[in-house]
Amino acid sequence: MEHFNLIVIGSGPAGRRAAVQAAKLGKSVLVVENRLRLGGVSVHTGTIPSKTLRETVLNLSGWRERGFYGLSYRVKKDIEGKDLGARLRMTLNHEIEVLEHQFNRNGVRTFGGMARFIDQNHIAVVAPDGDETRFGFDHAVIAVGTAPYRPANIPFNDHSVLDSDSLVSEPRVPRSLTVVGAGVIGIEYATIFSALDVPVTIVEPKDTILDFIDREIIEEFTHDLRQRGVTLRLGTKVEKVEIDEQGWAVSILADGRRIRTDMLLYAAGRSGATANLGLENAGITPVDRGRLKVDPVTFQTEVRNIYAAGDVIGWPSLASTSMEQGRIAALHACGAPMPPAPEFFPYGIYAVPEISTVGLTEQQVRAQNIPYEAGIARFRETSRGHIMGLQSGMMKMIFALDTRKLLGVHIVGEGATELIHIGQAVLNLGGTLDYFVENAFNYPTLAEAYKIAALDAWNRMPRTTPIAEVMEEPEIEITRRKARAGKAGA
């Protein structure tokens, strides 16, 4: 029986980062993956496929150019499932090749099969051909991710009634779509297909969507959806789904309404993929829907030499944070110093349009009784936004009144998930409103929205600043140019 310092179960973002980190510290590492190829949920059915599908749709539909050329503008007139699948396969192969090269370069061993714990220091792996191999370990990281929740009363057939995994396995463009569940996955796919001009209906039992996002951003987002013809059925649940004689999905809602569409995507939650791991043999008990409870600092489970990271431990279920969780788990297992976790991390929703947020929402600031002011910038106010033909999109910034420190940045619109990192850096470094007012941004860019939003907030803040700072922005720039010219002459 081979013995390893660290065994990682799963090769998604958390698993790969844990494995590489431990290997770089000189440890012997084995990664066990039950799929035919490496990559985990992120590469095969989650992050990479959904974002690739989004980019394909935006490119082929001409979505980004419709602000100039009209709603009827198309790059390709008839977009079919094969158009969507071609780019998915190319991207998938590239991601797997990069991961395989990374493992080989760092001396990480891999083994294909389904892992099951024998006890807290041994696992058995059943290969696809049925052979079983046993391995010993000092430490283990469980990074198996999640699988779509499939309730028994939903007649999944992977054609007209699907979950998010089967949707990307064989993508097709439906004539109409019902999305059950207005979480991140449901909203992303609903808006992607809406960009293809597919009539979309979203059904959500709660009266609100994406409650962790600032409400003003969500109001802007839902307004955009309704303008595009997306139907929102909030505050009601799907009681039953039937498939009619034509093979279409018929959703029967609790309020009596019926929705008939060519396709139904059930996206109401996911479960930790832990059912077949034999966790009871290692002394680990899953909690809600198969997820694992861990120490939030070290990512240890109740069995101290076994760690868990990534989506299998729940919120925030982001590829970016999963990577850091896996790395921190490996550092702790190897006895290496662990960096302090950043106080704030960005959250990105790759809907159409994108949403990204970092820091406190206005609702959280008010709940904490922090005196604050907020500033708004709309992308159409920027020269870059006008050049791009943007009709929507906004940035909201929140500042503390007493310290002028940045408290949160919230963006909806083109490039939101890229723009958010400026706010993330300033927030984690304890920066203030003055950074955005006093620094120059490339022109023309959407990043100018930071200065516009900061000035918008400053205009409503109490006037306790020196007289030089109360000049209009153009006067400030003229004064500074004269000062720089004077210094140069001297």
Image (cartoon, rainbow, N blue to C red):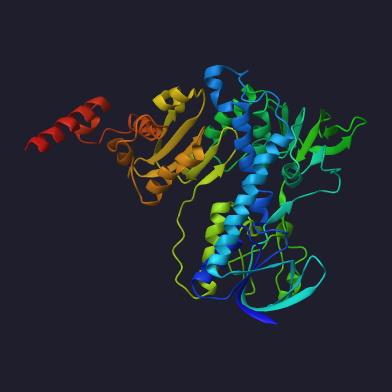
Please tell me whether residue 401 is drawn above or below residue 29 in the rendered image.
Answer: above
- Residue 484: quadrant of the picture: top left
233 relative to 370, above or below:
above
Q: Is residue 68 left or right of residue 232?
A: left
179, 288: nearer the viewer: 179
Quadrant for the C terminus, please. Answer: top left
Q: Residue at x 54, y 24 (%)?
A: 65
Can you say whether 330 is above or below 430 in the image? below
On the rendered structure, is 397 left or right of 237?
A: left
Where's the N terminus, which quadrant?
Answer: bottom right
Residue drawn at point x = 93 percent, y = 31 percent = 245
Q: Is residue 428 above or below residue 100?
A: above
Residue 123 visible from this viewpoint: yes
Task: Find residue 318 and report its horizontal and vertical position in percent.
Answer: 58, 51
Is residue 382 visible to the viewer in this orientation of the structure?
no
- Residue in the image at 73% along x and 36% along y: 82
Percent of width and height locating residue 240: 85, 38
| Location of residue 348 in the rendering, given as x and y in whole percent from the top left corner | 55, 43
Q: x%, y% of residue 148?
A: 74, 50
